Image (cartoon, rainbow, N blue to C red):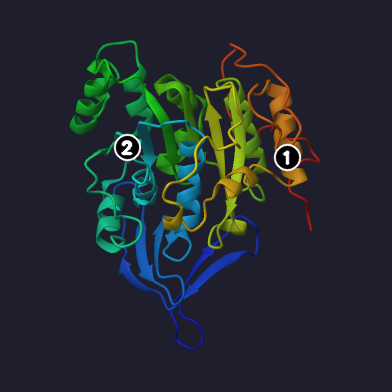
Amino acid sequence: KEDDGGVVVFGERGAVAGAEVEFEGGEGVVPGAVEFQDILVFESETYGRVLVLDGVIQLTERDEFAYQEMITHVPLFAHAAPKRVLIVGGGDGGVLREVARHESVEVIDMCEIDETVVDVAKRFFANSTASAYGDPRLGLVHDDAAKYLAALTTTRDDDDVETLKPAARAQVTQRRVDRSFAGYDAIIVDSSDPVGPAETLFEPQFYEAMRKALAPAGVVCAQGECIWLHLPLIANVLAACGDIFPTVDYAYCSIPTYPSGQIGFVLCSLDDSAPLSVPKRSPTFQDDLRYYTPAIHAAAFVLPRFAATAIDHARFRRGGGAGASSSSGAPRGGGGPSGRGAPPLPREGEDSVVPEDGGAPST
């Protein structure tokens, strides 16, 4: 739209009534519909180029580093020596850029369903997020990540593999026959919100598949929405993960152009010997980072009381993971996986495990 002065303004309406993020001076670069989602890239006055999918801001060049660094380096530094990493989504290339900084990583597999997002990122964000697509460690395929993981971890020979596109089928087949491939040390899920093509990435079945695809001591980190807007969803995802992984926790970071200026991360691990909030290594490339430090790693797990209460309540109801500490600092109860299977996440209108007084405070 245009304001009274004729300046082009892009606005994203938030999940809270009356909330809107606006950017002035937007010159559209790539508008239009693609196979999976509408895509728009435009130049803003103060935030650089902005990537928008289905009307929702995915990144701006000014603040993208906060999200990209935290969703990547928190899980990778929570692991002693990650060698094999799977990126789910992340077509803008930011997570790939950060993973590529780790010299210990030997294999980077990436499954991004929307090839157009990658093409647009290479064209318009080559000097920011999409700078590592030429890394020789990268194996990029365009397919449904849920199908990819199902095929990788299936006990059947061909049923799930045949549902994949040729490139993904070849990569999965290679991993399954490679005796040196013991699973991924880290899986990073850089997904959009749980609607459309990303909906299956928030389901317990997907977390089950990721667990099966992990190497011993493997770590999962997934985009975990916002504690101010999506606390019931977050609590139920964590509760379901507590039935799948021995260690489950939640962290967050600040980023101005995301709803409420905050985004979180669901973290799960097969290693129950140490909390995910304690990094096992320090960056050798700290001067190249703008947000992540070992101190911010630990601080990211300290949640406001309303969120910590709701999350811990959910974990108590469902069993929780034994290896994680409470976001408020106290030990979390519960044993490891219960063996009864992960419960489905509630749909709109269904009950949540968040207590009635455990949501975000009203104003």
Q: Earlier in the sequence, mark 2 or mark 1?
A: 2
Q: Which residue is mark 1?
A: 308
Furthest toward the bottom, the residue is 5
Q: Type of residue at label 2?
A: Cys
Quadrant in the rendering for residue 344: top right
* Secondary structure beneath label 1: helix
Residue beneath the point at 62% across and 17% down: 336
Residue 109 in the image, given as x and y percentages of width and height = 30, 35
Residue beneath the point at 77% across and 40% down: 358
Whether residue 162 is situated above or below residue 63 in the rendered picture = above
Furthest toward the right, the residue is 357
Characterize the local packing of mark 1: few (<14), some (14-19) or many (20 or more) Cα atoms within 10 angstroms.
Answer: many
159 or 261, which lies in front?
Answer: 261
Count of marks, rendered view: 2
Quadrant into which the N terminus falls: bottom left
Judged left or right of residue 292, residue 155 is: left
* Secondary structure beneath label 2: strand
325 or 102, which lies in front?
Answer: 102
Quadrant into which the C terminus falls: bottom right
Residue beneath the point at 65% across and 60% down: 17
Q: Which residue is mark 2?
A: 111
Characterize the local packing of mark 2: few (<14), some (14-19) or many (20 or more) Cα atoms within 10 angstroms.
Answer: many
| Numbered mark located on residue 144 in the image | none
Residue 115 in the image, given as x and y percentages of width and height = 26, 46
Is residue 57 at all visible to an observer of this figure? no
Q: Type of residue at label 1?
A: Ala
Residue 339 in the image, given as x and y percentages of width and height = 58, 11
Is residue 131 at all visible to an observer of this figure? yes
Whether residue 6 is situated above or below residue 327 in the rendered picture = below
